[in-house]
Amino acid sequence: QRQLVFDSAFDGVFTVDMDFNITLFNKAAEQLTGFKQDEVLGKPFRDVLYSHADLGLPETTPLITAIQTGHPVIEECIYINTADGDILPVSVRAAPLIDTRGVMIGGVKSFRDNTDRIQTNLILDHVIDGVFTTDKNGKITSFNKAAANITGFDRQEVLGKSCHDLFASERCEQRMAQFAQFGSSAEPWIDKHFYLKAKDDRIVPVSMSSVPIADQRGNLLGTVQTFRDVTHELQNSFILDSVTDGVFTVDQNFIITSFNKALEKITGYTAAEALGQKCSETFRSELCGTEKCPMAEAMTSEPNAAAQNTKIRNKKGQPVPVNVIATALTDDDGNVIGGVETIRDLTEITELRRKLSPEGTEHGILTRSPKMRKILSVLPEFAKSDATILILGESGTGKELIAQSIHAQSNRSDKPFVAVNSGALPDTLLESELFGYKAGAFTDARKDKKGRFAAAEKGTLFLDEIGDISPAMQVKLLRVIQSRTYEPLGSNAPIKTDVRIIAATNKKLEEMVSQGTFREDLYYRLNVVKIDLPPLRERIEDVPLLIEHFINRFNEQRGRHVEGVSEEVLSLLMHIEYPGNIRELENIIEYAFILCHEGLILPRHLPEWLAGRSDTSISGPLTLREMERKAIMEALRRNDDQKMKTCRELGISKDTLRRKLAAYGISDS
């Protein structure tokens, strides 16, 4: 009868007498070890189960200890040998065997195959995160090496202990209650801000996830708990959040993995909104997705670092000027695993530079001319629109500079500004330059090439010398403006385009339309907004300002110390017609720099054709003081002696005007 009871047990069970000889060996023990009961009865159990050469006969075992002490003994993992010579890991429970009189007559030992648990522990010990499992009551059933390293608890110390008692956290009970209520349908519990109490009473910040284990009927069997020490991450986060520059990191797929507080202020996005997103979707810079992307450049080329000035768009869609520095992140073997980028907001610096710019500078354009100031005053309004703009003016009047200023003030400012000289190319080349071509479109077209429309996508395309293109090209350009699509050479598939077109010419397009050399419909498509730039001879008051600008630029470029121009030279330069406009004045100053290395530019430093005019063409030149006095008096007269209007026209402050009035003896009444 006793044999039948033991044979019904799932665990292996055997008994021994006081001489440690086997007296009973159940069916489960036979299956686990391969020994038959009739082979082992009467034999010393150590000779049967510990005879493997690698094990050696132990001096004591849990069963011997139990008989010697009279108390039960539990061992989670010992090793016995099987009939075929293998070693079997088992968990054992041994106890003394007492008869009805209370006399010890031997011992009983039950054992369970521990192979699966050992294999599980070996696997878990190779996991870098801490992992432990619990039963349905929250008792810990396994505990890997990483968990031991993080908490300081040894595996044997925690097995069978309550998660709540061990880590002093009520969240253990909360999770178990939720899992018990919902079983297999319970959602995994993820807590990025969890705190464990370590063995030495340290509080360890961890990121933890808990997953329920359920049977086929959905009943809770236990849980798997995974946690990672985030002490370094928190320290790094605190450091990054104390940095005034924006900082973020990405993985190899350009997915944002960290996002500091400063960057939240710059972009308007919270870290929660940015994490997990592609950086291009968050920053929307003109460099994103291009070969010039600093992050991509840092991660794919030596020396794994790149810097750029660019513009990003904040959450409201507004452009923000920034300086970015990107560096690759590498592992211990030097493999690139991501990147880190520092973003510095240049908004205040840009505004400060604007405020500190020389008097007469507006939107990067130097002028004191009332005509030019009137034009510049409406540029911000033109910039808000996507309407096509036509800029008219002689060569050298700064048409491209005006186009760049419009682009810089528009909501396309963080996208490309692409300029094309339409008059410099024949039709076939101009068409491929604008629209691109497909491989095989012509003899040398070995691969696809994108055109300027594609390069300027979402930005501004500046078409200079538009009056010089052929009638055939005019038709194609008109079609693009009307349909907002174009076809690359060698392709019949239209491509949609989103560009703002600004055209410019030094030709009189209205006369060309009347003569039939320029299409009237194209002219009206281009002439939605017209800007007519005055030549330099009509804004002669800007000459001193431009001279100073060119001298400063050439001094910086060439390491010279030229202080300015003499009054005689200034007088000469104020009386030229300038058919080449600003470009001609620039060339004159550049020529003077060849002969003048320091001090003032004198007439002998000027080109011969100009220096020779000093004695013949210009008599009684005004001095610089006389010219400035005259300019102020004329401005006062034009503005009915209203000081503020005069200051705005001259591009000077009220204090500057007051000083100059006193210096020149002009009444301040």
Image (cartoon, helix red, strand yellow):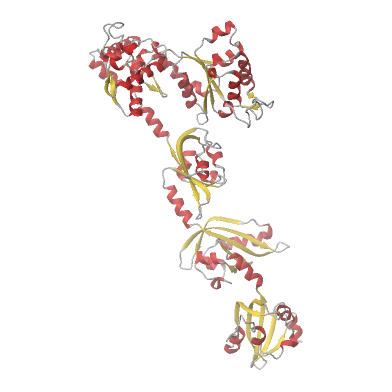
On screen, residue 62 above or below 218: below
* Whether residue 269 is situated above or below residue 458 in the rendered picture: below
- Identify the image quadrant of the N terminus: bottom right
Q: Nearer the viewer, residue 445 or 380?
A: 445
Q: From what the image shows, is residue 136 above or below residue 481?
A: below
Answer whether residue 293 is visible to the viewer in this image. Answer: yes
* Displayed quadrant of residue 176: bottom right
Q: Position of residue 71 (x, y in %)?
A: 59, 85
Q: Residue at x 29, y 5 (%)?
A: 616
Q: Residue at x 65, y 73 (%)?
A: 114
Q: Is residue 146 left or right of residue 654?
A: right
Along the horizontal axis of the image, is 357 left or right of 217?
left
Q: Give the left or right position of residue 636, taking residue 498 as reference.
A: left
Residue 39, position as x, y percentages in the image: 73, 87
577 shown above or below 19:
above
Does residue 527 appear anywhere in the picture?
no
Pick the front one: 446 or 344:
446
Q: Nearer the viewer, residue 54 or 32?
A: 54
Q: Residue 440: give x, y in percent of width and height.
A: 66, 29
Residue 357's image quarter?
A: top left
Q: Quadrant of the C terminus?
A: top left
On the image, the x and y values in percent for residue 276 come to 57, 46
614 with respect to 158 (left or right): left
Q: Quadrant of residue 6?
A: bottom right
